[in-house]
Amino acid sequence: MNEFLARYKYTLLTATSVLVLLFVVGYFLFPKMKKASEILVAVRSEIGESSLLENNTVSPDSLIASYKKISADLDSYVNVSVSASKILTFILDASKENGVALQDLSTGEVVNRGENLEYPVRFKANSSFPQFHRFLTALENSTYCVKVENVDMTSGSASVNLSVLSKSSAVDKAGRDE
């Protein structure tokens, strides 16, 4: 047996090394390679999908221009100049457009809530329900940030408490005194 080991010593060591190497690869590296392969397949499929999109996409410059336009539109809604007189004028115009007769339209004291200002508004309205609903929808969908706080309705009339919200920086200095 010693002659056999001496004669095939390097062959046996090579075979043992290959078996140990296969065990290490199979036991430790194969699961990691499998996970890496799954990630590679996912990345390739995403690249394939994105290449399909590239044929119908717009240029990055036009995307940036579109982003700037949308951003400016959002800023115009957020940074609306607010004053009590503008709010009252806006509510009166909306009531005329929707056929709602207003009574006792008034604003309260401006409330400072940190960075935000709140302009309370109270009024009574006479109209049918569909007209009144269109009127309130017009107020809520306007450039002003309108928060309807309370609506008490009876047949043909309604009493409404709402607030118009604004950032302190978007308020006209003269508008706070109006």
Image (cartoon, rainbow, N blue to C red):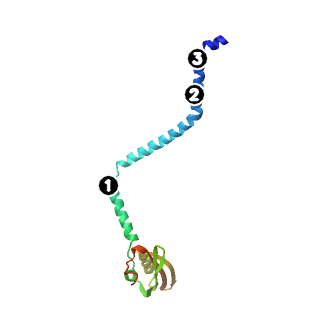
Residue 95 x %, y %: 40, 82
For marks 2 and 1, give the CA distance.
Answer: 54 Å
Quadrant of res 32: top right
Quarter the C terminus occupies = bottom left
Q: Residue at x 59, y 25 (%)?
A: 19
Residue 175 x %, y %: 38, 81
Residue 168 x %, y %: 43, 74
- The outermost residue toward the right is 1
Tell me the number on the disc at residue 21.
2
Q: Residue at x 36, y 63 (%)?
A: 70
* Precedes in sequence: disc 2 or disc 1: 2
Name the residue type under label 3.
Thr
Kind of element beneath mark 1 = helix
Name the residue type under label 1.
Asp
Q: Residues within 10 Å of mark 1 (few under 14, many from 20)?
A: few
For marks 2 and 3, give the CA distance.
Answer: 15 Å
Q: Residue at x 46, y 74 (%)?
A: 116
Residue 136 x %, y %: 44, 78
In-image side of 15 versus 48 (left or right): right
Q: Residue at x 48, y 82 (%)?
A: 160
Kind of element beneath mark 3 = helix
Q: Which residue is mark 3?
A: 11
Q: Nearer the viewer, mark 1 or mark 3?
A: 3
Quadrant of res 131: bottom left
Quarter the N terminus occupies = top right
Name the residue type under label 2.
Leu
Tell me the number on the disc at residue 61.
1
Q: Observer-nearest residue: 176 or 70?
A: 176
Tell me the number on the disc at residue 103.
none
